């Protein structure tokens, strides 16, 4: 089954404790992105990747890091999380321009 | 310039009625306009999409109307069903190397039986 898998689905943690949210896709897609979803703000792109070792900032990259060492994986790293990063996070992958973005089921992060 | 404005924020429609959600954009470089549907606890999923070379696209009960001169596009859901109750996001894409989408703020649709 074609899918984007995120882990964990839920996480409650404390300010400053490094965390990683994993994302894996099995569709051999080149494009992958991370979004955060906040009430009244819709989905905002954090980082995206066009291929292995090629990543770039989206609209809200501050406080986040990403890496793309393998085509299927695109982890999101919060090195020193803060409460304003409490949000619902989605990973997405796509075959290319004008193609559907396939989203994972989301990771709800609460940072106390 | 990069924003996509979506309205209404929420919508209640009776079963069998027509649901209409509107979006507007400023950047004329956008050349791809998808609509995504999101159910609680799930990620958004592509519903229907349009390119600016056509003014309307229909797939089943879902229709996108696109007005290039007004820089507006809308989603019409005909014969709305309770199973259509979800959050709907419009988006605008720039294509190119980034495959970037700018999303609207979402519309929570409730279809009453």
Image (cartoon, grey):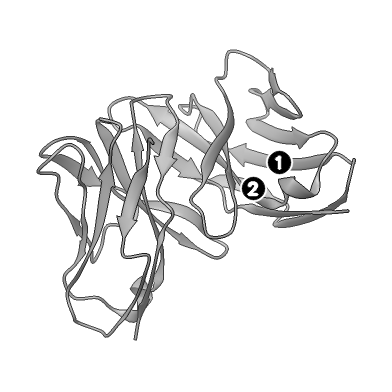
- Tell me the distance, in whole angstroms, between the alpha carbons under discs 2 and 1: 6 Å
**Looking at the image, is mark 2 or mark 1 earlier in the sequence?**
2
Residue B2 in view: no
Front-lying residue, A3 or B12: A3
What residue is shown at x 57% (from left), y 63% (from top)?
Answer: A40
**Image check: A64 left or right of B56?**
left
The residue labelled by disc 1 is B22
- Picture residue at 57% right of the left edge, 53% below the top: B105
- In the image, is residue A48 above or below residue A107? above
Task: Give residue A109's position: percent from left, percent from top.
Answer: 37, 72
- Can residue B5 be seen from the camera position used here? yes
Taking the view exactly as shown, the residue that stands out farthest to the top is: B53
A60 sits to left or right of B30: left
Q: Which residue is mark 2?
A: B6
What quarter of the picture does the C terminus of chain A occupy? Answer: bottom left
Q: Residue at x 45, y 31 (%)?
A: A100
* Secondary structure category for the residue under label 2: strand
- Badge 1 crowding class, 10 Å Cα cut-off, few under 14, some 14 to 19, many 20 or more, is some
In the rendering, at what x and y percent does residue A20 appear? 20, 65
Q: Secondary structure at mark 1?
A: strand
């Amino acid at each position: 089954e074609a899918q984007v898998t995120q882990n964990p689905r839920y996480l409650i943690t404390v300010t400053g404790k490094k965390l990683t949210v994993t994302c894996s896709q099995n569709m051999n897609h080149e494009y992958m992105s991370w979004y955060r979803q906040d009430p009244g703000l819709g989905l905002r792109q954090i980082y995206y990747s066009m291929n292995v070792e090629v990543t770039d900032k989206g609209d809200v990259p501050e406080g986040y890091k990403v890496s793309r060492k393998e085509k299927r994986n695109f982890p999101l790293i919060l090195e020193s999380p803060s409460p304003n990063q409490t949000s619902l996070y989605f990973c997405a992958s796509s075959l290319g321009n004008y193609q559907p973005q396939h989203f994972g089921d989301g990771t709800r992060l609460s940072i106390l | 310039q990069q924003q996509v404005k979506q309205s209404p924020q929420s919508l209640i429609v009776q079963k069998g009625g027509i649901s209409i959600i509107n979006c507007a954009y400023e950047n004329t470089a956008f050349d791809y306009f998808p609509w995504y549907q999101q159910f609680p606890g799930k990620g958004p999923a592509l519903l229907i999409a349009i390119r600016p070379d056509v003014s309307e696209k229909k797939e089943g009960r879902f229709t996108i109307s696109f007005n290039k001169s007004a820089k507006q596009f809308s989603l019409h859901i005909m014969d709305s069903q309770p199973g259509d109750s979800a959050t709907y996001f419009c988006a605008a894409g720039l294509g190119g190397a980034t495959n970037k989408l700018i999303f609207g703020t979402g519309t929570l649709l409730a279809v009453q039986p």
